[in-house]
């Protein structure tokens, strides 16, 4: 069945599966380290309470059959172990059916976590990992040649990811059309990185070029993915370079990295071998009948489910990130349709004084990723996702994002909850919990070159 195999894409397939395994590993480890204070039995938004209110059909998950914090930890550690084994190449030497089973289990376990973790897992990159992880089940391993239908489905996913993001920008904030959005975005993005200050301080003409390059990568290049080679590889390379620029300029969880991984599937082995002298066997051109049937069936499923994302993309009321089914298959994507022009930060403080007076000493809680101390340089965390820090960014934009988790967060600070404090960089009350906690709103901006030289500070802030 020569029609079934995509010649010259064995290395591309390997890079995709290895890359997805690495992202799965990061995602599962993030769940291990953060779930207890966020969604555990005593968390801010407990999973048991969610399970009582939401049926399996609306949120498919193994946790509908049983939940305990120990079981959640077992699920997350199992996912991390399988992802690590895959990353180390174990599935490449398994029988094809066993390899597919490993990828299926990875998908089921992460789907189970996403579907019950509520607002903490409500971002587009969760659906993106699930959709890409589902397709990886049918990419096969070294025992078979890369199935061309699945590789086309991967390109279709990459097209929707990039083109959808481009459309949402052109339909959204006016600054994307007049090329001024990046006058602000590097400073006001959810979680700046160590180089964001420098990106923000680039000349405005370079910011306009950044926006033009973004529009070219997201609105023009996606159509090249379905062109003959080398056009498709060039289109993918442009997207990869653009995503690496975004990796350097901020922290966006694994959104950029998974886009890069998907782009690698478009580049033929002959191009990789020009850069790195590595070659792989193409795999057998004859695939088992069950594998062929499954690949054809999944391709048909993708075609049918694509109706909803296509309708969304051509709609004037385009949704930014959405799943049209509870299994997170064939979703729609987009990011930053609007750009905030001013950065506000919620700063949480506590005091040991039992009675609050004008002389009360308030000590500030320091978070791992979100801005706080003006002298602290932003850190690089992506592809790891700091879920608490990320949600804090939304509160000044729409206070509704703080309900119901923020009051629960404050209550845990008032009792020095150990698991909650692990999410923070610094607890100013190590010996005894504070008597009172308050939240203050500040306006933050990056310092100028002059202010940076004179004070050493990365931020300047004013109370609001």
Image: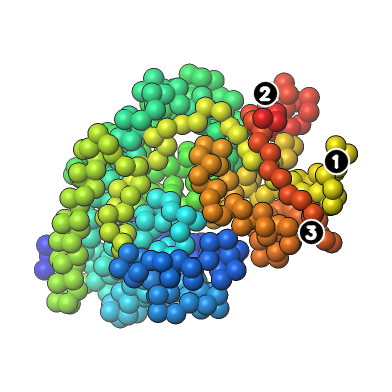
Q: Is residue 282 left or right of residue 86?
A: left
The x, y position of residue 307, in whole percent, is: 17, 50
Give the Cα distance between marks 1 and 2.
36 Å
The x, y position of residue 190, in whole percent, is: 54, 41
Quadrant position of the N terminus in the picture = bottom left
Question: Counting residues from the N terminus, which is met first, the one under dot 2 or under dot 3?
Answer: 3
The x, y position of residue 427, in whole percent, is: 76, 55
Question: Circle 1: is it few (<14), some (14-19), or many (20+) Cα within 10 Å?
Answer: few
Foreground mark, 1 or 2, reads 1
Checking the image for residue 448, the label placed there is 2
Quadrant position of the C terminus in the picture = top right
Q: Is residue 457 above or below residue 58?
A: above
Q: Are marks 3 and 1 in contact (CB under 8 Å)?
A: no
Question: Counting residues from the N terminus, which is met first, the one under dot 1 or under dot 2?
Answer: 1
Q: Between 23 and 239, which is closer to the camera in this rendering?
A: 23
Give the Cα distance between marks 3 and 1.
18 Å
Q: Between 395 and 216, which is closer to the camera in this rendering?
A: 395
- Identified at 36% across, 61% down, the residue is 130
- Identified at 50% across, 44% down, the residue is 400
Q: Which residue is mark 1?
A: 357
Query: Helix, strand or loop at disc 1?
Result: loop
Give the Cα distance between marks 2 and 3.
38 Å
Res 282 seen here: no
Q: Between 296 and 400, which is closer to the camera in this rendering?
A: 400
The x, y position of residue 253, in whole percent, is: 50, 51
Checking the image for residue 433, the label placed there is 3
Q: Quadrant of residue 327?
A: bottom left
Q: Are marks 2 and 3 in contact (CB under 8 Å)?
A: no
């Amino acid at each position: 069945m020569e029609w079934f195999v995509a010649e010259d894409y064995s290395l591309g397939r390997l890079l995709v599966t290895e890359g997805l395994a690495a992202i799965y590993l990061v995602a599962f480890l993030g769940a291990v380290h953060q779930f207890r204070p966020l969604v555990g039995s005593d968390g801010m938004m407990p999973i048991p309470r969610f399970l009582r209110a939401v049926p399996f059909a609306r949120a498919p998950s193994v946790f509908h059959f049983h939940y305990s914090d120990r079981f959640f930890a077992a699920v997350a550690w199992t996912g991390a172990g399988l992802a690590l084994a895959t990353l180390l190449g174990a599935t490449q030497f398994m029988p094809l059916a066993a390899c597919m089973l490993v990828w299926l289990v990875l998908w089921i376990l992460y789907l189970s976590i996403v579907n019950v973790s509520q607002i903490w897992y409500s971002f587009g990159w969760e659906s993106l990992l699930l959709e890409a992880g589902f397709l990886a089940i049918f990419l096969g391993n070294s025992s078979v040649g890369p199935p061309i239908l699945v590789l086309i489905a991967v390109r279709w996913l990459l097209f929707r990811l990039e083109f959808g993001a481009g459309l949402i920008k052109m339909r959204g904030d006016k600054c994307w059309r007049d090329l001024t959005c990046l006058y602000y975005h590097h400073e006001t993005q959810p979680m700046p990185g160590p180089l964001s200050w420098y990106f923000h301080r680039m000349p405005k003409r370079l910011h306009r070029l950044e926006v033009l390059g973004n529009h070219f990568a997201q609105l023009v290049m996606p159509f090249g993915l379905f062109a003959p080679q080398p056009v498709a590889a060039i289109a993918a390379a442009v997207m990869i370079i653009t995503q690496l620029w975004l990796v350097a300029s901020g922290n966006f969880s694994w959104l950029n990295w998974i886009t890069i991984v998907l782009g690698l599937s478009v580049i033929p082995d002959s191009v990789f071998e020009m850069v790195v002298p590595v070659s792989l066997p193409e795999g057998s051109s004859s695939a088992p009948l069950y594998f062929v049937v499954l690949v054809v069936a999944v391709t048909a499923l993708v075609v049918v489910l694509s109706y909803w994302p296509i309708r969304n993309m051509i709609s004037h009321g385009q949704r930014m990130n959405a799943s049209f089914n509870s299994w997170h298959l064939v979703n729609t994507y987009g990011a930053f349709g609007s750009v905030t022009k001013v950065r506000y930060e919620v700063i949480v403080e506590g005091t040991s004084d039992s009675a609050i007076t004008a002389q009360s000493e308030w000590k500030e809680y320091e978070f791992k990723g979100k801005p706080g101390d003006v002298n602290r340089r932003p850190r690089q965390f992506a592809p790891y996702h700091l879920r608490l820090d990320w949600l804090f960014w939304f509160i000044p934009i729409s206070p509704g994002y703080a309900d119901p988790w923020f009051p629960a967060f404050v209550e845990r600070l008032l009792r020095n909850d150990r698991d909650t404090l692990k999410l923070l960089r610094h607890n100013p009350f190590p010996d005894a919990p504070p008597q009172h906690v308050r939240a203050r709103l500040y306006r933050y901006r990056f310092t100028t070159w002059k202010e940076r030289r004179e004070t050493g500070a990365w931020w300047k802030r004013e109370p609001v």
